[in-house]
Image (cartoon, helix red, strand yellow):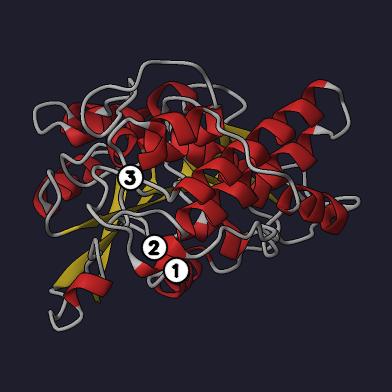
Amino acid sequence: MNYIGSKYKLAEFIADSIKEVVGSFEGTTIAELFGGTGIIARNLKSEVKKLIVNDLEPYSFTLLKNYIGNTQPIAQSEALIQTLNDLPPFEGFIYQHYCAGGGSGRMYFSDENGQKIDAIRQQIEAWKKTQHIDEPTYYFLLASLLESADKVANTASVYGAFLKHLKKSALKELELTPAEFAITQQANEVYNEDANELVKRPAVQGDILYLDPPYNARQYGANYHLLNTIALYDDFEPKGKTGLRDYNRSVYCQKDKVATAFEALIADAQFQYIFVSYNNEGLMSKEEVKRILSKYGKYSLKTTQYQRFKADKTENRNHKADATEEYLHILVKNF
């Protein structure tokens, strides 16, 4: 998925940097409390003893339940995917509120893809209610739908707005493809909670804590509201031109609150090694993050350059992305 703040291109840098400090991942418990699409945890899944992951957004929680929570093969996965792909179209919530044919004035998906999303989503829920599928299979299928729908969305990558005309990728027929995950022998934990509250739990502790909080004022709940709607598939009245739903407003996206929340999180964290991804465009300065972390132990910093997220690659092919400096703040915490 195209994703604001994605660490896909930085995953190797982050993993190597962590290993330089801790020596080895073998036998470790690693927590990631702002999980997003789970790229870092997914890359480390086969190397560690246990993962604890969390995200407050429902679509992220769904992805994490599949990629991190699921560790054993899904029975009859190919047959289930095929059955869902073969369903007849259905004019459900997505079609009615987020496709041109539904009369809402919104064009997040083609009419055909909106109806296919509705048909698949309703069937997944029906299978869950009748216990035709278990929880691991439910999240596997739901994650597969989220990623497959995202590939044909008529947006500039985020869902803050839709495009006025269907772009080339949005005209393609949605094909449900499996969200394959790594098979391991773990008992990982996946949460859908506020990170500052979750970290206070006695059970949420381990060796390494990796934090990738929001950097700026862009709220993920607004930018990915439609993925949350597909994940939850609940009944509500979409608001305004873009069909927004009520969403979580993170304090990490608020200039006057972020530092206080961040320090509280560090103070409560029961992990010896803490690694924090941030960049030079964040609401907190490099110096402010250093000041806070240095109160709690030995501090150090690693940096690297990378190209920032661009919302629409197809519309900006001749525009070179600006380089951003990524910071990995490191704390060896005193207890």
Dot 3, crowdedness within 10 Å: few (<14), some or many (≥20)? many
Dot 1, crowdedness within 10 Å: few (<14), some or many (≥20)? some
Q: Can residue 54 be seen in this view?
A: no
Q: In this view, does 24 lie to the left or right of 169?
A: right
Q: Residue 88 or 326: which is nearer the viewer?
A: 88
Residue at 62% across / 60% down in the picture?
Answer: 175
Task: Give the foreground label among 3 and 2.
Answer: 3
Q: Is mark 3 on a helix, strand or loop?
A: loop
Q: Can residue 81 be seen in this view?
A: yes
Residue 309 location (% of width, % of height): 25, 64
Mark 2–mark 1 contact, CB under 8 Å? yes
The amino acid on which the numbered mark 1 sits, given as a three-letter code, is Ala
Residue at 27% across / 35% down in the picture?
Answer: 105
Q: In this view, does 38 lie to the left or right of 171?
A: right
Residue at 26% across / 57% down in the picture?
Answer: 165
Mark 3 → mark 2, Cα distance in angstroms = 29 Å
Residue at 65% across / 38% down in the picture?
Answer: 119
Residue bearing the label numbered 2:
7
Q: In this view, does 315 lie to the left or right of 266?
A: left
Residue bearing the label numbered 1:
11
Residue 35 location (% of width, % of height): 47, 45
The amino acid on which the numbered mark 3 sits, given as a three-letter code, is Met
Residue bearing the label numbered 3:
107
N-terminal label among 3 and 1: 1
